[in-house]
Amino acid sequence: MAKNDTLLLDGIIDDRVDLKLPSNRRDEAFEYLSFEQILKDYDLSTDEIESGSVDGRNDGGIDGFFILVNGHLLADPESFTWPKSGSQLEVWIITCKHHDTFKQAPLDNLAASISELFDLVISSENLKGEYSESILKCRENLKYAYRKVSPRLSSFTINFSYASRGDTLSIGESIKARSEQIVRLSKDSFGSCDVKFSFHGATELVEMHRKMPNFCLEIPFSEVLASGERYVLLASLENYFGFVTDEGKLRRYLFDSNVRDFMGLNRVNEDIKITLENDSSPDFWWLNNGVTILATSASVIGDSIQLQDIQIVNGLQTTESIFRYFENGGKDDNKRSVLIKIIVSQDEDIRDTIIRATNNQTDVEIASLHATDKIQRDIEDVLERSKFYYERRKNFHINLGHPSSRIVTPLYLASGFVNLILKSPQKASNLKSRFMRSNDSYNAVFSEKTPIDVWPMIAYILKKTDDVLENVRPVGSAANEKFLKRWRQITSFITISRLLEKYDFSANELAKMSQSLISSEEIEKTWSFISKARPSDLQGKKLQHKNFYTNLCADAAEEYSLANKEVVEKRNVFNANGHNPRKRQKITINIDFAKQVNILLPPQPWKPGIHRIVIKKLKCTNNEYFQAVQLLIDEGLRNKQLDGVVYDLEGNVITFDPARVNPQTMELIED
């Protein structure tokens, strides 16, 4: 190791501490940096990295536990898109120590844990060691994933990593021997499993940190057709493979705008695989729709094209199939080609329209397309005016180098809305991204009728609350996220309610508040009240009772004379997880089903309750009905309708229900 690598690494950690990424504690900043760099090829978001952090008491020597299926992180099995075949299962077990050497004790602890954690026959209740709730959850997710993909498992890899500030060239023999023992223990638990153990020291972490995502790339072509700033070209499969890979790894960051995950070997991908493997098949581009790439500039130089700010917005299935073919040693002696469409535009509205259009031509979950909604772009714009950055597309602002303290995700912002506007700190604390699967749930939060100025206020309140709670939370990055998730909503809700002297404040009232009123001192005052009112709940793994948040709000109402406590947790707007508990056969939401819905729908504007008639006749769910309607809107067969008003794609009013809507204000007529 170069003598100065440790100093360079410490400088990087200093920057992370200043940015509070993820906190102002050096050991936690080092741990997060290690996760981020070791898993860099998977292009994980901040939320995804934090979800795999299990550091804390009873962690079994494991600081990071990450499960990936076909390169995509498995955090929530219920909302995960499981491949139908051709599954690749990867597990990363990471141990991080902010030491200047590699020591044996962490591996001794890890070896003892792995020997029983990987024995999936043993139930969690019968494990001899004591393990945290986070470790047990990850173990259950691994067990579930292993069983789920076993009939179609093409490869299974377990990767161990020990990260420190030490020198990998000076690792002791006993430490290496222990790492080899961990590999053997893992292979004993899983028969056909490839197990690897890596050491990442200061030199390796600095080198990985220097390697930044490259959005400026060149691809050779054999044929090109150009019209203005639009190009259609043919590139050899090998050249395209080289374009989308870096040292044999897929450049996943190029797909941030592509709303689909790789579905495994479904019917379409199986056909692609057969075509690639058949040397006598017609040229590849004859049988495949190809790839669509967005760029902000393009220059043809000889037989290649140089692209800036690349985003592959359609063709993920094609790209991953080509990648897997060559990754597994495939050859292309016939020099077949893939069709590539390149569109150059710097207009975000045009780019979003293209993303939605190119990803709406085959079955895809409608919720995945919300990133391109007008309301999402509006929120992004209003947040940016307040110096907040809205991560409506994964890692967009992270890759631009914006500080994490000013970045908010849709889920983070939605939880704040559920807490402060819908008056449900309990639902907000448990909110998961799958709530966006339901149009009812999504529209209840991201409504165009919500005053747009409330969004930066929600972001400010949550970030300010996090800053205060950061100083009182327990040690450990995993404990940090759980602590903040449990307490940020109720703390911020009671704080704002105290300042406004009531619980039933409106979105307009919240938007008009002066940020200077929401000081650290006011939040600390609320935390002091919570600490005294519920001391036994501050360190516990779980809250003591079901109505904890409601009871705490009742106590605050009495302490501070807050009006209308009955509004807390009373709105049954949606299931916080977006999960439909009914056991039934899912209906495939494609254009054929949408056309059945279209036949049953009357001309717009339709009356309230029409969805119940359609649902009853087609025996579908609310969610399936609204997904079908959204598909009809996307296809131009119907228009968006909200509260009796019908809008075109630009948001202009087309028509309205005169019996329900005031023609001057376009608002519902009050009874």
Image (spheres, grey):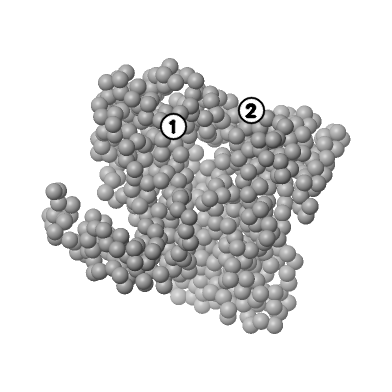
The image quadrant that residue 17 belongs to is: top right
- Looking at the rendered structure, the secondary structure element under dot 1 is loop
Front residue of this view, candidates 617 and 335: 617
Quarter location, residue 664: bottom left
Report, in whole angstroms, how far the alpha carbon at label 2 lies from the one at label 1: 25 Å
Q: What is the three-letter code of the residue carrying label 1?
A: Lys
Q: Amino acid at mark 2?
A: Arg
Residue linked to disc 1: 546
Q: Is the residue marked by circle 2 packed among few (<14), some (14-19), or many (20+) residues within 10 Å?
A: some
- Residue under the image location 51 percent in, 77 percent down: 225
User: Can you say whether 92 is above or below 215 in the image?
Assistant: above
Q: Residue at x 72, y 57 (%)?
A: 155
Q: Can residue 73 be seen in the rendering of this structure?
A: yes
Mark 2 or mark 1, which has the lower sequence index?
2
Above or below for 482 versus 666 = above
Select label 2 or label 1 by which is in front.
1
> In the displayed structure, does residue 597 sit left or right of residue 343?
left
Does residue 506 appear left or right of residue 482 in this picture?
left
Left or right? Give the position of 184 relative to 444: right
> In the drawing, what numbered circle is on residue 451?
none
* x and y percentages locating residue 125 in the rendered image: 66, 35
Which residue is rendered at x = 61% and y = 74% of the image? 271
Q: Is residue 217 visible?
A: no
Kindly indicate whether the residue at mark 1 contacts the one at mark 2 (C-beta within 8 angstroms).
Answer: no
Quick one: 145 or 201, which is closer to the camera?
A: 145
Return the x and y of residue 469 as percentages of the image width and height: 47, 26
Q: Which mark is residue 57?
A: 2
Dot 1 alpha-carbon crowd within 10 angstroms: few under 14, some 14 to 19, many 20 or more: few
